Amino acid sequence: MTLFLPDPGQIVGGLVITLCTAGAARWFRAVSSSGFLAGISVGGWVSLGLGSPGLLVVGAFFLLGTLSTRWRFAEKERGGLAEPGGGERGAGRVFAKGAIGTALAVAGLFDAFNPGLVRAAFVGSFAAAAADTLGTEVGQVLGTRAFLLLPPGRAKPGTPGAVSLQGLLAGLLGAAVVAGCGVAAGLLAPLAAVVVAVAGLLGSVVESAASPLLRRIPLRDLAANLVTTAAGAAIAALAISLLTPGGAAR
């Protein structure tokens, strides 16, 4: 088994970017102290596995998630729908959203895995995280008719597992932005990015469909985020392997 490391300059650059971004996130209270440390861990491993290009994808998700959480925050807070802690993400949420993508970035170091599929799965995991976050934050404000997938039925906005047309569209937009950043970073071809964006949205839908089972788990939010990102990664890699000769994402 051969170990492939990114260019040392990319690794160092990625670590500098990680520290600066995590520091700014803490300064603006987008993350808590534990979230700050967790963000450094995620960014550090992604830098090691994919260099600074991988951080562009992570950063796109983080920025979209932060902006959507802050968007009309007071209104969501009055309705009991806002993120606790003033919207600050703790270590649990950071790791839940980023653990699958981080593991895939590290997997990309080894020649035992198809690099194109690993990159597609990496971007797919964060595309799914973005789709889930935007779908929730936008859908619970603009969604006019929320509904559950399993069992099918109407639901109040903000109900765990509920989706709306507005939320799904916002989620698709978020996944597309993250996938587009994958193209800009050189991790995906443009056509592959379209596939990965759809996979990201489908990952969030899988989590919504699995909500009845996830409600029985004590750490429901942690499990839901892991299911979302794992589903997005798996669907992206499977779709690329079926649609692209040799499974090459770029």
Image: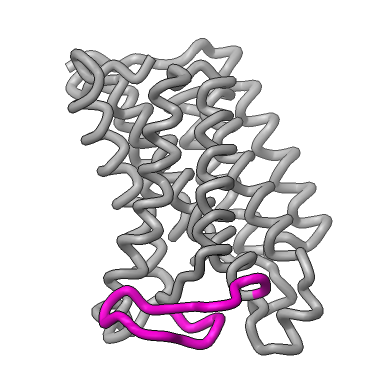
Task: Report which quarter residue 188 is drawn in.
Answer: top left
Q: Residue at x 62, y 67 (%)?
A: 137
Name the one closer to the observer, 10 or 124: 124
Tell me: residue 161, above or below residue 29: below
Magenta highlight on residue 159: yes
Magenta region, residue range? 141-160
* x then y, percent, for residue 39: 59, 50
Q: Report whether 197 appears left or right of 14.
A: left
Q: Report whether 28 appears left or right of 99.
A: right
* x then y, percent, for residue 12: 61, 21
Colour style of the rendered protein structure: one colour
Q: Residue at x 35, y 53 (%)?
A: 203
Q: Residue at x 52, y 22 (%)?
A: 183
Name the one closer to the observer, 73 or 2: 73
Magenta highlight: main SS: loop
Name the one closer to the observer, 238 or 24: 238
